[in-house]
Image (cartoon, rainbow, N blue to C red):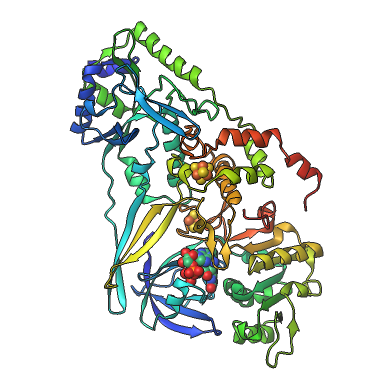
Amino acid sequence: MIPQLYSVRQIKQETHDTFTLELDPKDGTKTPSFEAGQFNMLYVFGVGEVPISISSDPTAPKYLMHTTREVGIVTKAMRKLKRGDMIGVRGPYGTHWPIEESAGSDIVIVAGGIGLAPLKPALCHLVARRENYGRVVLLYGTRSPNDILFQKELKQWRADFDLEVYVTVDRAIGSWRGNVGVVTTLIPKAPFDPLSSVALICGPEVMMRYTVQELVRRGVNHGKIHISMERNMKCGIGFCGHCQMEASFVCKDGPVFTYGALENIFGKREV
Amino acid sequence: MATSAKAASGPALIARENLQAVLDALTAKGYQPIGPSVRDGAIVYDEINSADDLPAGWTDEMSGGTYRLKRSGGSALFGYVIGPQSWKKYLHPPVIRLWKSHRTDCTFTISKNAEESPKLAFIGVRACELAAISVLDHVFLHGKFVDPIYRARRENILIIAVNCGQAATTCFCKSMKTGPRCVKGYDLALTELAEDGRHDFLAETGTPRGADILAAIPHKHATETDRESAARAWANADAQVTRTLDTTNIKELLLGNLEHPRWDQTAGRCLTCANCTMVCPTCFCTNIEDVTDLGGKNAERWRKWDSCFTLDFSYIFGGHVRQSAMSRYRQWMTHKLASWIDQFDCSGCVGCGRCITWCPVGIDITEEARAIRETDRSQKENADGNP
Ligand SMILES: Cc1cc2nc3c(=O)[nH]c(=O)nc-3n(C[C@H](O)[C@H](O)[C@H](O)COP(=O)(O)OP(=O)(O)OC[C@H]3O[C@@H](n4cnc5c(N)ncnc54)[C@H](O)[C@@H]3O)c2cc1C
Ligand code: SF4
Ligand code: FES
């Protein structure tokens, strides 16, 4: 329950409101290993602690990365940290994306907004072992072209690793010539075999709800659809009770669940 | 040696005037006795340094939304049923500092709180409360993670249970299969025999630690008459537990009725005051507070009891998950009676009735469960083929 100290090696501004922290353990030890989809509790001195997914490459964990959108008290304070500052880290916690388990399948990844950050380790893993998978399709929606994360990586994955990347924005501005509309509109036409696909989804809950509907409509098995849930979290280890969704503790039974496991409550009002 | 052999062969008898010797034996073994006493018009648990601190001659009366302490006319020390507090306050403290942190330039250090785990002897633990401690054990000790604070405290507790000789109208321990008789989870279990001018305690040992305490104090072998007297007290309590909660398929019943109109009706009365969660002996939710001193050099993290009845409990950026009182009442009750079973392999309700007594508007969990059972819509929902 005690945070370990990490020092900020770099802060990278990703978009106008999103930044990536690169962290090294203060005591000089190796960055601990983690699974794609897991999260850490990050503590900013005197301000507070919040759950943030790990966004580094799990196959080559040089240092710890967290990509965060500035929204409130803690995330804004986190943005103000400088190189060399310390941050408290507890974790890694929670379940992970079924990457190794899905070898041989097509992979469909659907991300909304900051939801691409928790999926980045999965993408890193897929491109690192690209030969083990069938088609890999990424459908990514953001509010505007200015909100598109990891643009460099997206280009590289598309060009060098045969990833089929489709990006759409809610609102086209500037010179945007790509898709306009919510990310779910990309699903009916996306090139994957529904019967041999594993789907990974992360984004706002409404977006995930419609995405699941579309995937189910195309025939993807409920147990092959994986969603990463977000709930208030104070402890990360099943004691504070805040993250409960019916019988599930999102912190330890999730955040990654199969749609099959949450079917009866996913989308139910205020559960 | 002779005395402990006697204890092992059957219940013992401790005279009322030797109860002080029990406290002295506990103190001699390093335990601070904690037991019932009267404060602010209620039975509360507090340090007990003399048998005179116990609530002699007091009894309590409870019903939905009402609690009244009154003189019993007798001299029984445990002649009340149950107060608002539970032993949870010692095992899972309402407020505790987790760590301290100190900043220098761009770095800081975090120092763990010295784990404080006083040796406490709980005296007067009821059967439903033994069950509640066992439920907390499931929550904090038997899962994927262990709470070090709970563990350190739990390991240092000695439990002297006291069987109920009477029950309140709010008690439904029989339905929850937790009482009224103490059957496990104690070191020593007493039954107060205060009838026909006698005043003694029948003592049953549950563990070698309990036997050690018994061995250290004057006692006799209980006679047939003593045992019959105790059996009458147990039967009296048993007969007085009249409130019921039918637990047959309760999980399926409640989780299959998340859209039942009853939730809205009950929410219309619920004040979301969180009293029910504070008095519940198994509610374990907590909040975290990170605080700093004025100079900004020293920070601390505190853990405090929290309640799913507060709006902020489910806050995430962009909105609260459970905005309505309906969803919060439903979360609490379905957690207690239904989802708890999947989480911890036991019910979260032990039938102590505190939530009924201390609810300012007298909402009754047994009545709510009954209302839903009588108008069960889960069959219908399935027949409709919900997507
Ligand atoms: C498993 C998990 C992984 C996450 N991964 C990321 C990520 O990779 N990148 C990212 O930008 N965001 C992520 N989030 C969301 C992030 O935790 C919130 O944006 C953050 O807690 C907001 O804190 P704040 O103090 O800035 O906001 P405020 O609105 O000021 O919130 C106050 C407090 O409420 C709680 N809280 C608020 N929003 C959330 C939330 N969405 N989830 C949980 N607790 C919340 C926190 O305790 C927070 O300190 C994740 C959330 C979860 C549950
Ligand atoms: S049920 Fe009663 S005690 Fe519980 S929050 Fe509602 S009004 Fe308060
Ligand atoms: S975050 Fe505390 S129980 Fe899940």
Q: Residue furthest bottom?
A: A175
Residue closer to the observer: A249 or A47: A47
A223 to the left or right of B21:
right
Q: Nearer the viewer, residue A125 or B346?
A: B346
Q: Residue at x 73, y 65 (%)?
A: A210
In the displayed structure image, the side of residue A203 where residue B106 appears, left or right:
left
Task: Indicate the position of residue B106 as horizontal and vertical percent values.
Answer: 31, 79
Q: Quadrant of residue B161?
A: top left
**Residue A175 appears in which quarter of the rendering?**
bottom right
Q: Is residue A178 left or right of residue B313?
A: right
Give the x, y percent position of residue A140.
68, 77
Coordinates of residue B135 in the picture (x, y in percent):
46, 39
Quarter containing the N terminus of chain B: top left
From the viewer's side, name the closer residue of B27 and B180.
B180
Q: Is residue B224 visible?
A: yes
Is A137 situated above or below B47?
Answer: below
- In the image, residue B306 sits, relative to residue B83, either above or below, namely below
Instruction: Indicate the position of residue A269 as horizontal and vertical percent values.
Output: 66, 55
Q: Which residue is drawn at the image coordinates 80% and 63% (left, top)?
A: A217
Q: Residue at x 49, y 60 (%)?
A: A233
Question: Is residue B147 shown above or below B188?
Answer: below
Q: Is residue B342 visible?
A: no
| Residue at the spot 29% in from the left edge and 24% down from the top edge | B211
Total numbered labels placed on residues in the image: 0
